[in-house]
Image (cartoon, grey):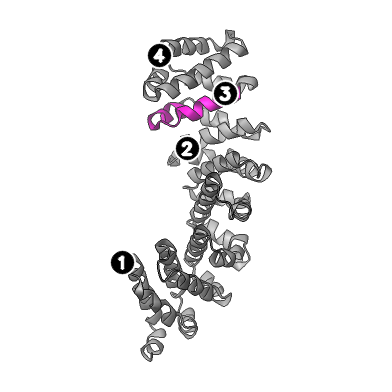
């Protein structure tokens, strides 16, 4: 800790230090955090070093990469996020996302994502900063840098709680970038690629939870995500199957979308998926597909058509499942189908 104290004292003399001394002190902080994160974090707070880090980010380009790395490491601790915010570190980091230095983009993206996680007030401040456009641009400009792709996906996921930011992401074309990521990585068995597939899938679902962003993505059945749904439902990749089913379930929160999707034939695609998972299948996929079918059955115009297409008979095969959540969803779907118009048709079986 004595060594860390010395490094912190050196940094507080920021204006009088050479770049070499600043980098040495920043490396010393990283080493101390690796050795004892809790004690080092307490000392960092006590010495009030955060405004100095903001100064380095803004005024010393050759040391800014290392400073961003230090901030990203500091922000792993929940209690350290407030000092980072109070010192204006997030707003100092955002312009660095315009850099062409991939190491800078990696550390700045990681730091922003960690500090902003589950902080709606801070996320609201970021609406006007252009951070979303920058993060999406990085995804499209550096598709072959999987560490950078993964970090930016996580940062975007951490910012996707706010509806206004969801809309910004869609307007910036993030859903198109996500579709490309899934296409590129879906066949990979590498752990980091599988993590990126999951993060991209989770972000798609998060965007669909906002009403305005969901409608922009659906675009009357012409949006890129809906265009990919059939491919995902028919794939052999459980994560893509789940993403496809959850996408349909969320698009189906709007009655007009429901009618359009039934016209486009999504019901048969969902039934085919469910039949793959009847015996020893993925329960989460079954659950999502049944939720989608139930939502599709809400508009009166869809009920009779779905029954005539054999929905009731085909989903009854899932009664073999011993999983209570699946059985619960199955009964809910059947109940929705037989409500009103469908009741008489179903009773004749």
323 shown above or below 182: below
Q: Which residue is mark 2?
A: 116
Q: CA distance from mark 3 to mark 4?
A: 20 Å
Q: CA distance from mark 1 to mark 2?
A: 37 Å
Front-most of residues 2 and 120: 2
Label 1: how many Cα within 10 Å (few below 14, some 14–19, many 20+) = few
Which span is picked out in magenta?
A: 64-85
Which is more N-terminal, label 2 or label 3? 3
| Secondary structure at numbered mark 2 | helix
Mark 3 in CB contact with mark 2 (< 8 angstroms): no
Q: Which residue is mark 1?
A: 324
Query: Where residue 113 appears, x then y in whole percent?
Result: 50, 38
Quadrant position of residue 332: bottom left
Which is more N-terminal, label 2 or label 1? 2
Q: Which residue is mark 3?
A: 66
Front-most of residues 281 and 144: 281
Label 3: how many Cα within 10 Å (few below 14, some 14–19, many 20+) = many
């Amino acid at each position: 800790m004595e060594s860390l104290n010395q490094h912190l004292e050196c940094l507080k003399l920021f204006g009088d230090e050479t770049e070499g001394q600043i980098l040495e002190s920043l490396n010393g902080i990283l080493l101390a955090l690796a050795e004892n994160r809790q004690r080092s974090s307490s000392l960092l707070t006590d010495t009030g070093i955060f405004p100095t880090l903001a100064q380095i980010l803004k005024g010393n380009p050759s040391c800014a990469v290392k400073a961003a790395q230090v901030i990203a490491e500091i922000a792993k601790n929940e209690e350290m996020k407030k000092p980072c915010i109070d010192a204006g570190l997030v707003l100092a980091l955002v312009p660095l996302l315009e850099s062409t230095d991939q190491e800078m983009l990696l550390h700045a993206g990681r730091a922003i994502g960690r500090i902003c996680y589950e902080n709606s007030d801070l996320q609201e401040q970021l609406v006007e900063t252009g951070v979303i456009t920058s993060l999406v641009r990085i995804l499209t400009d550096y598709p072959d840098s999987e560490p950078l792709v993964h970090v930016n996906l996580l940062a975007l996921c951490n910012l996707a709680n706010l509806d206004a930011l969801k809309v910004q992401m869609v307007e910036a074309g993030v859903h198109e970038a996500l579709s490309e990521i899934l296409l590129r990585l879906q066949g990979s068995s590498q752990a980091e690629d599988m993590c990126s597939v999951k993060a991209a899938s989770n972000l798609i679902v998060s965007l669909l939870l906002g009403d305005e962003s969901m409608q922009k993505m659906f675009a009357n059945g012409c949006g890129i995500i809906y265009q990919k749904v059939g491919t995902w439902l028919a794939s052999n990749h459980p994560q893509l199957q789940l993403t496809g089913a959850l996408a349909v379930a969320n698009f189906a929160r709007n009655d007009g979308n429901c009618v359009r999707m039934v016209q486009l034939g999504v019901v048969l695609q969902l039934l085919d998926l469910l039949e793959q998972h009847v015996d020893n299948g993925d329960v989460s996929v079954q659950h999502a597909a049944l939720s989608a079918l139930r939502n599709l059955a809400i508009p009166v115009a869809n009920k009779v058509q779905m029954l005539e297409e054999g929905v009731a008979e085909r989903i009854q095969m899932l009664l073999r499942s011993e999983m209570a959540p699946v059985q619960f969803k199955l009964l809910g779907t059947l109940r929705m189908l037989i409500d009103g118009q469908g009741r008489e048709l179903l009773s004749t079986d």
